[in-house]
Amino acid sequence: MKFSYLEDAHEQWSDVLAIGRTIERDGKKYHMVGMTLGESAELYIIEPYEEQENRHRRKGMRNQRRLLKENEGHEECYLHCSEFCFGTQWLHVQSASAGPLEHSVQNYRTIQLFLAMMSAGWVVPEWLKEEEWENLQLVTLEIADLDELPKYSPEMPIIIKHRPDFKRYLLEKAVTLNVGKSRSFSFVDHRGDKVWCYINTVALMDVWKDTEEQFSNPEYIKKVSPEQLKQAKEHCYRALEQSCPKGMCYIGVEYECSKDISLQFYSKEYLKSRPEHHKGSASFLMMRLKPDKDIGIHKLP
C-alpha cells in the first residue's frame, strides 16, 4: 500500500444527491443510490449479479477469452437506459459502465462513494444491508449536459426509459483489419442467418490529443472551477497512462451490418492475456464514439 494509491483513489464532488429508491422487477430488487456532480454528473444503481455456475471450478488459465465466454448471456438491467425523468426534468444518459462490487472491496473510490452518499442522507435499505458484494454490481450512468443535480424528494415520481432489449452472443471469427483500408466479410448469426459486415474505416485514434483538446475547450473550462479542472486532468491522465500510454493510440472501426447488430472486435493478444488489475481510474476510463454520418456508404446504419 502506498500513499500514491490513496491520491489516485481520492474523489471529490461539488455536489452529492442521495436518492435511495428500490425498484422491484421480475422478482429481483434494484437500488438507485444517488447522483454525484464533479467533472460530470453520474447516477449510480446497484443491481443483482450472478456468476455462471462452476466458473471457478473450470481448469486452465483464466484469460480474457475465457472471461468473455463465462460472462456470455449476463445482461445488465439498467446499463442500457437512455433517459431518466425526475419530476418534470429529463436526464439524458451519455455513457455507462458496470462492474461487480466484489472487485471493489479494495477499490477505495467505490467505498468513498458509498460513504459520501451516507453523509448526504442515504440510508441502506434493510434488504441490502446483509447482501454480499459478490452478489451485486454497480452501474454508473454518466448524464449529458448537466451543470447541477436535479431537485429531488422521496415522493417525486421517477420515469426510466430503457433502450430496446438486446441479447449478447459470441462470434469467434478471425478478421484481419488494416489501418486505412476497407473490407467486408460475412458470418452466420445465432438465428442461422447470413450477415454481411462492411468495414468502411479503420483508423488510429489519438486519445491523448482528443483529451487535451477537450480540456482546452473554452466551453468546458467555463463550466468548472480551476480546482475541478486540475483534478479532472490528473484523474484522466493517470487513467490514460494505464490504459493507453502516451505515444500509443486506440483503433477505431467504423462498420455497417446488413442486420441490426453491434459488433465488438478484440485482438488475439488481448484474448490470450490474463486480466490486469488497474489502480482506480483506469477501470473507469470510457470512450464514446460516433460516426460522422448515421448512414454508411452501403445505405446501412
Image (spheres, rainbow, N blue to C red):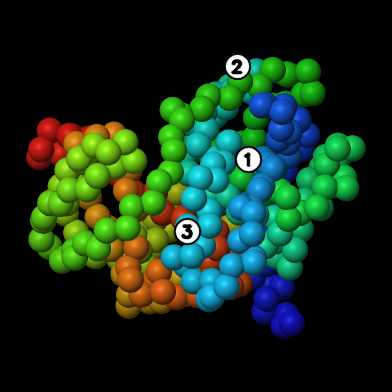
- Category of crowding for the residue at label 2, using alpha-carbon neighbours closer than 10 angstroms: few (below 14), some (14–19), many (at least 20): few
Query: Label 2 to label 3, Cα distance in Å?
Result: 40 Å
* Tag 3: amino acid: Leu
Q: Nearer the viewer, mark 2 or mark 3?
A: 3
Camera-nearest residue between 149 and 23:
23
The one nearer the camera, 55 or 89, is: 55
- The image shows residue 123 at horizontal and vertical percentages of 86, 39
Number of callouts: 3
User: Looking at the image, which residue is at 64% across and 54% down?
Assistant: 53
Depicted 154 relative to depicted 49: above or below: above
Residue 91 appears left or right of 12: left
Determine the secondary structure under disc 2.
loop
Q: Please state the horizontal and vertical placement of residue 164, each as a whole percent of the image.
A: 44, 28
Residue type at mark 2 is: Thr
Q: Secondary structure at mark 3?
A: helix
C-alpha separation, residue under disc 2 versus residue under disc 1: 17 Å
Residue 224 in view:
no
Q: Quadrant of the N terminus?
A: bottom right
For residue 36, above or below residue 89: below
Locate the C terminus and report the quarter of the image it occupies: top left
Amino acid under disc 1: Leu
Camera sees residue 115 = yes
- Residue located beneath label 3 in the image: 68
* Secondary structure at numbered mark 1: strand
Foreground residue, 282 or 134? 134
Residue at the spot 53% in from the left edge and 76% down from the top edge: 61
Q: Is residue 105 left or right of residue 137?
A: right
Name the residue tied to disc 2: 88
In this view, the mark in front (2 or 1): 1
Tell me, for residue 43, which label it has, or none: 1
